[in-house]
Amino acid sequence: MRTIPSVRGKSNGLKTIGNMEKTNFKHSYKEFSLQAVVRRVQNMVALRDDVDVENAHVKFSYGNRKTGSLVPSVSTIPVADCGNCKVCKAGCYDVRNVCFQTSVQRARANNSAILMKERKRYFDEIEERCKALRFFRWHVGGDAKDRDYVDNMVRIARAIPTCDFLAFTKMFDIWNAWIAENGPLPENLHLIFSDWRGIEMENPYNLPVSSPVWFDKDGNEIERGPHTTDKYQWCGGFCEECAEYGTGCWTAKKGETILFEAH
Ligand code: SF4
C-alpha cells in the first residue's frame, strides 16, 4: 500500500473509515431532465466540431472548487466521452454543476477534439505536464473510453512515480480485464469504481468504490449506492485536502467505500 506523505506534516483530524463526520450537506440533489442533459452535451459536441485541433493544446483545470488547485485535472465531454452512463447521465454531477459555464464547455470540447483527432498528442501533453505535478485527477467529466485509453493511463502512472493519479470510473469491464491480464495497477494510480443506483458492477479485485447517498430535504437518508461496502468513510468534499493529508480516495484500500452526498 503506497503511503502518501502529508504535505502539512500531520493529520487534520479527518476520521478513519466508518466514522467520518457528515458535514455541510445540502440535501439539494435534483436530477436534470434527460432533455436538458442531452442539450448541454450536444452543445459541447457542437463546440468540439469547431476546435482547431492542430493549434490547440490539452487544457488542464486548476482550482476547481471540488478538486482544488493542488489537484489539476483533465476532463473530456461528460456523457459523450463516457462509455457506461446509461443509468447515471440524468444525475451527472459534471453536466449539472460544472458544465454550465461556456469556458468549461469549451475546455471539455477542446480536450475531446484532441483526443479524437490526435490521440497520441493528447496523452503526451498530459504526461509532460504531470512530470511537474504531485497530484493529478483524471476526468471530473468523461471516463477512460476504451482499452487504449486505460493502457495510456497506466503507462503514464508508471512513467511518473512522483505523481499520484486519481481516477473514478464506470468502465469496470475494461479495468477488470486489464488487471486480469497484467496484475495489480501501479500504486500511484488510485482507481475508484463509481457506484450509482441501478448500475451493474463486477468488482472481482475489490477496488475501492465511491458510492452516492441520497437524502430527503429533511436530511434523512433514503438510499445509498448498491455496491457500498460496510467499511466506509464520508467524502470530505475537497480532494486537495485529502491529497494534502493522505486520506480519502488517495489512500482508500481494497474493499473500502467512499460515501458522498449525491449532489
Ligand atoms: S474523499 Fe477526498 S479525494 Fe475522494 S472525492 Fe472526496 S474529497 Fe475527493
Image (tube, rainbow, N blue to C red):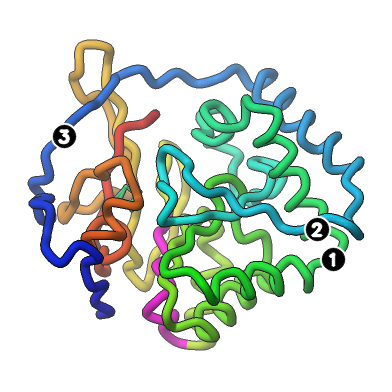
Q: Left or right of 52: which side holds 97?
A: left
Q: Is residue 224 left or right of residue 55?
A: left
Cα distance in 3D space between marks 3 and 1: 43 Å
* In front of the other: 195 or 8: 8
| Amino acid bearing label 3 | Lys
Report x, y in % for residue 144.
61, 61
In the rendered image, the vertical position of residue 125 relative to residue 75, given as above or below:
below
The residue depicted at 26 percent of the width and 56 percent of the height is 248
Residue 210 image position (x, y, % from top left): 35, 50
Q: Quadrant of residue 260?
A: top left
Q: How many marks?
A: 3
Task: Say which residue appears at 41% left-offset and 36% top-offset.
Answer: 197
Specify whether residue 251 is painted magenta: no
Judging by the rendered image, the residue that carries numbered circle 1 is 118
Callout in the foreground (2, 3): 2
Ligand 1 lies under 8 Å from the Cβ of mark 1: no
* CB atoms of marks 1 and 2 within 8 Å: yes
Disc 2 to disc 3: CB gap under 8 Å: no
Q: Residues within 10 Å of mark 1 (few under 14, many from 20)?
A: few
The answer to which image quadrant residue 86 occupies is top right
**Which residue is depicted at the point 74% across and 38% down?**
106
Dot placed on the residue nearer the N-terminal end, 2 or 3:
3
Lower sequence index among marks 3 and 1 = 3
- Residue under pointer 3: 22
Q: Within 10 Å of the Cα at label 3, are there few (<14), some (14-19), or many (20+) other Cα atoms? A: few
Specify the amino acid type for callout 2: Ile
Disc 2: which residue: 114
Magenta part of the chain: 183-193
